[in-house]
Structure formats: C-alpha cells, structure tokens
Image: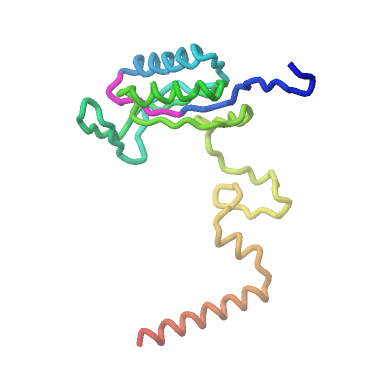
Amino acid sequence: MNENETVILDEKEIYEISFIFDNRLEEGAAVEKLETLKKDIASLGGSFISEETPYMRELSYEMVRVVNNVNIKFAQGYFGWVKFELLPENLEEINKKLKLDEEVVRFLIVKTDKGNDIFTKDIPVMRADSSINVSGKEEVEGDEGGIDTTVEDNIEENLDKETKEELEAEIEDLDKDSSSEEE
C-alpha cells in the first residue's frame, strides 16, 4: 500500500424501520415477529439503539395488502418501530425480507440520527400554570385559572387602540360592501 493511499472503512449508518403488522396476529405473535426482525438485523451485523413493542392501533386510512392473490383490507394493525445501526450494503436484505412477509401490511425504512429518540407516548397534555411566565409577557387569566390561549383573546390583548379602530373600520366597510352586493 502506498503512503498517500487512504483506506476507507465501511461505517454503519443509523436506520429506523416503522411497521404495521397484520391485525389478525395474536399480540404475542406480533412481538415474536419484531424479535425475528431484530434477529435478521443482528445476523447482518446490526446493533440496536431503541424500539417500540408493537401495539394494536386504528389506522388513519384503510390499507390493502395482497395475500395469496387476494386483496385484504386493514383498518387497524400492530404498529411498532426499531432503530438500529447497520452497514448500508446490508439494508437491502432487510428490505427484501419485509416485502416478502405477508404479515407485514406496510413498512418504512428511513436513515436517521442516533439522538432523535423523542418519544411522547403517554405524556399527558396539561394546561399551563398561570404562575409560570414563559414568554415574558403578561398572561391573561382564563376560566379555569390557566393561561387563556384563544386566538381572538391574544389578538385583542396585543393590539393597540389605534390599530383596533382601523381594523374595526375595515370590517365595517367589508360588511357594507358585502351587504350592498347582496341587494
């Protein structure tokens, strides 16, 4: 090897597979299917970063998958995902296996980063506490003691008197124009 030559080593990339498994599977079978997928990835030299166990969910729209030359419609399925590192040349093997598996309704493989594991499932939505001032502006108390975040109230609160009068005049003009056109 020449001193000026450099050796480029294959580096693993980070991927995430999200999938929907057939809703006719038992819950245990869906989990086993995920474990089989992980074994396939590991057999190709992959290593795991994170995952979500498949759970039954309603789909946003009905999907069709051909199984034994018959169109089968799915309105729900087991959704889950797995994030892993793998050499790029081995990814096509995983893609082929998923395409041929008739119990996989749909899947998507994306290249991603290690650090974007934001997972918000089961985080409750809470009303903001009026004692906390995040924006540095004065909050308006709502009916339940929290911050009132309705669009109209925020607009009204932030407009100066002169601007309000101009907008009200424009609205009146528009109302007059629309009523005269109707006659």
Q: Quadrant of the N terminus?
A: top right
Task: Please state the horizontal and vertical placement of residue 126, each as a whole percent of the image.
Answer: 56, 39
Q: Residue at x 76, y 19 (%)?
A: 2
Q: How did the renderer colour the structure? A: rainbow
Start-end of magenta stretch: 18-25
Q: Is residue 43 above or below residue 150?
A: above
Which residue occupies 59% across, 47% down?
A: 145
Residue 56 rendering spot, x and y as whole percentages: 36, 27
Q: Is 23 in the magenta?
A: yes
x 47%, y 26%: residue: 81
> Residue most toward the front?
2
From the viewer's perspective, tell me whether residue 32 is left or right of residue 126.
left
Figure quadrant of residue 99:
top left
| Picture mark count | 0
In the image, residue 43 sits, relative to residue 137, either above or below, namely: above
104 in the magenta segment: no
Image quarter of the C terminus: bottom left
Residue found at x 54% / y 27%: 15
- Residue at far right of view: 3
Q: Is residue 178 left or right of residue 46?
A: left
Residue 147 on image: x %, y %? 61, 50
Horizontally, residue 53 falls left or right of residue 123, namely left
Which residue is nearer to you in this view: 107 or 124?
107
78 vs 170, nearest the viewer: 78
The one nearer the camera, 159 or 106, is 106
